[in-house]
Amino acid sequence: MEDRFVEMALLYDFYGKILTAKQQEIIELYYMKNFSLGEIGELLKTSRQAVYDNLKRAEKQLNSIEDRLGLVCRYQREEKQWSQTIKRLDNVIMALDREYSNHEMVKELQDIREFIGSITGG
């Protein structure tokens, strides 16, 4: 269940602006604020079924756009590649640091690793 929430949050981050204002509100309440369908219905003064229908329509739109554009998939793939690159770089830094603890190359690699981490969030 949690994976679905993460997936929808990513889809919404990438494509949410194409949804109607009502669909955006329902997605935010359901997925980001963890409201139930009934609670959303009460808040929006509509039926639970109307909320459910709007939610499913919004999810379908987001998934359809992702199927065509693939931006979330590409983002996740690149994030994984950067994470693996950072791990490899960390291993190289540790190995070099054991041999040459004050060497300029070690410091340069550490700077590169910090830079990569700053742009990738890693």
Image (tube, helix red, strand yellow):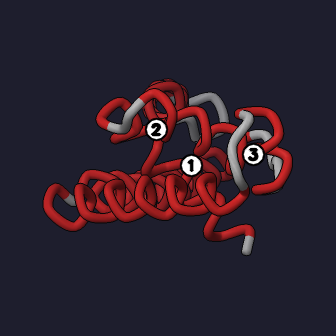
Please state which of residues 91 and 62 is positioned toward the viewer in this rendering: 62
Image check: 99 left or right of 78?
right
Image check: 22 left or right of 39?
left
Neighbour class for label 2 at 10 Å: few (<14), some, many (≥20)?
A: few
User: In the drawing, what numbered circle is on residue 13?
Assistant: 2
Residue carrying label 1: 9
Image check: 33 left or right of 99?
right
> Considering only vertical position in the picture, is 62 above or below 28?
below
Mark 3 secondary-structure assignment: helix
CA separation in Å, label 3 and label 1: 21 Å
User: In the drawing, what numbered circle is on residue 89?
Assistant: none
User: Which residue sits at x=35%, y=30%?
Assistant: 17
Please state which of residues 15 and 75 is positioned toward the viewer in this rendering: 15
* Total residue callouts: 3
Residue 118, visible in the rendered structure = yes
Name which residue type carries label 2.
Asp
Residue carrying label 3: 41
CA separation in Å, label 2 and label 3: 23 Å
Question: Closer to the camera: disc 2 or disc 3?
Answer: 3
User: Which residue sits at x=36%, y=38%?
Assistant: 19
Name which residue type carries label 1.
Ala
